[in-house]
Image (cartoon, helix red, strand yellow):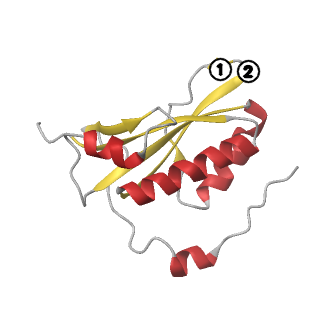
Amino acid sequence: MEADVTPRPWRRMFGRGKRATLDPSRADLVVVASSFDDAEACSAALERATTLTPNAPAVLRHHLRIPPRHVETVCVIAAQDGYAPAPQVRGPRTDELETLILQRVQLLDALHCSQERSRMAGLAQRHDGSADGWDALQPNPRP
């Protein structure tokens, strides 16, 4: 089955507003929030995050496990929403699934984090995979 990769201009018109700026390849990025528990709300994970800088851009990463035959399709679909595979993070295969981390820069709040978590879980499930969790990176506040 072919993936629908039709551009969605309405997302640019009505969606997410200004894009946050942060270079995801910066060497000083550290994990400031994460959740790998399906039952934990994003709001709880963000409240527990002690080093998160609110209202500042973050690299939001979703950790997925996808069958190798679907990895390219998943990346193409996720790219429509500004996601890219994290460089050199595609990890080992487990149970015939390949680890794939998709990331994008955005302002991080509970509502948008929850929406993106749900979107990534649905994308993974539609391609015979699963979403293990998410984490967010920001520059290390202590150099």
In this rendering, is residue 73 above or below 4? Answer: above
10 Å neighbourhood of mark 1: few (<14), some, or many (≥20)?
Answer: some
Whether residue 21 sits left or right of residue 134 in the image: it is left
Q: Quadrant of residue 9?
A: bottom right
Give 111 or 123, whichever is nearer the viewer. Answer: 111
Residue at image coords 88%, 49%: 1
Judge whether residue 38 can be spotted in this image.
yes
User: For the residue labelled by badge 1, is the local secondary structure a helix, a strand or a loop?
Assistant: strand
User: Alpha-carbon distance for marks 1 and 2?
Assistant: 6 Å
Residue 99, position as x, y percentages in the image? 60, 29
Query: What residue is shown with label 2?
Result: 96
Residue at image coords 36%, 49%: 43
Give 69 or 130, whichever is nearer the viewer. Answer: 130
Amino acid found under the numbered disc labelled 2? Glu
Query: What residue is shown with label 1?
Result: 93
Amino acid found under the numbered disc labelled 1? Arg
10 Å neighbourhood of mark 2: few (<14), some, or many (≥20)?
Answer: few
Query: From this viewpoint, which residue is outermost toward the front?
Result: 39
Residue 9 shows which numbered tag? Answer: none
Residue 105, position as x, y percentages in the image? 40, 55
Residue 15, position as x, y percentages in the image? 51, 74
Query: From this viewpoint, which residue is outermost toward the right?
Result: 1
Give 122 or 30, whichever is nearer the viewer. Answer: 122
Residue at image coords 38%, 55%: 110
Whether residue 24 sits left or right of residue 13 in the image: it is left
Give 22 or 125, whichever is nearer the viewer. Answer: 125
User: For the residue labelled by badge 2, is the local secondary structure a helix, a strand or a loop?
Assistant: loop
Judge whether residue 23 can be spotted in this image.
no
Specify the quadrant that holds the C terminus.
top left
Q: Are marks 1 and 2 in contact (CB under 8 Å)?
A: yes
Residue at image coords 85%, 53%: 2
